[in-house]
Amino acid sequence: MSDNRLRLGVNIDHVATVRNARGGAYPDPLRAARIAEEAGADGITAHLREDRRHISDADIDGLMDILSVPLNFEMAATDEMQKIALRHKPHAVCIVPEKREERTTEGGLEVAREENKLAHFIAPLRDAGCRVSIFIAADQRQIDAAHRIGAEVIELHTGAYCDFHAEGKPDESARELEALREMSAYAHSLGLEVHAGHGLTYDTVQPVAAFPEVRELNIGHFLIGEAIFRGLTPAVHEMRRLMDEARA
């Protein structure tokens, strides 16, 4: 793989959301993971929530068994999730904020305020060989805190940039994009690996994909939605094409 190639992680959570709407076995998120992998995904992302609203424990068991690409296991900083991660030892663990009432992850983790707690929380995960990523806003204070606690990776929350774009607010969108650009460069200067994700679409991915410091994008909801209309393989292929074009 070229050093400049941007990795694509495909989040399969919302295949499980559709499955759970009927309480049956279909559609199967493991099948989606295999299709995404065959379509060129460099990794699979799955968020096991405390309330198990989409991905289940059995899904994580299955993903660990079938995947030949890395699993990025998203989770809250709770004792229960730490035990699950230590049992499975996935390639990567991404610590995200989680509130029961939210529909999706709203904003980045408050690392600076919880620095001591998070440092102790991630230490066993690092010792077990997991790459620890922290999902944060494009904020220097949070990046500095993530660096101090020993995270190897940060994932920058692109939601505000995407939301302003969708709302037709170009000035606000441009401001958020500039913050992402500046903080990608800053985090890279500290030796952190930089990832990004949340809300990215075909219309918004290329400016972020063009940042040379960003090594990976994690995209899920849009791709699963687009798969309804064009199929998951073509949906992943188009995202991959746009990312590669931006990177070139």
Image: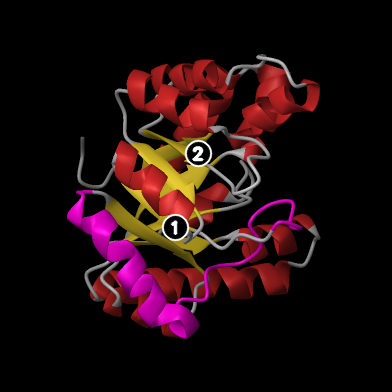
Location of residue 107 with respect to 162 vertically, above or below: below
Estimate the spatial distance between the alpha carbons at disc 2 and disc 1, rounded to whole Å.
18 Å
Give whichever of 177, 74 is nearer the camera: 74
Local crowd size for mark 1, using a 10 Å CA cut-off: few (<14), some (14–19), many (≥20): few
Image position, residue 81 (x, y; %): 46, 50
Q: Secondary structure at mark 1?
A: helix
Identity of the amino acid at label 1?
A: Asp
Q: Quadrant of residue 97?
A: bottom right
Image position, residue 95 (x, y; %): 45, 58
Residue at the (64%, 28%) spot, across then down: 16
Q: Secondary structure at mark 2?
A: strand
Give whichever of 103, 82 is nearer the camera: 82
Give whichever of 128, 46 is nearer the camera: 128
Q: Which residue is mark 1?
A: 79
Image position, residue 115 (x, y; %): 39, 80
Residue range in magenta is: 100-129
Identity of the amino acid at label 2?
A: Ala
Local crowd size for mark 2, using a 10 Å CA cut-off: few (<14), some (14–19), many (≥20): many
Q: Which residue is mark 2?
A: 46
Q: Which quadrant of the rendered structure holds the C terminus?
A: top left
Location of residue 205 with respect to 124 vertically, above or below: above
| Residue 247 in view of the camera | no
| Residue 93 in view of the camera | yes
Residue at the (27%, 66%) spot, across then down: 192
Q: Is residue 107 magenta?
A: yes
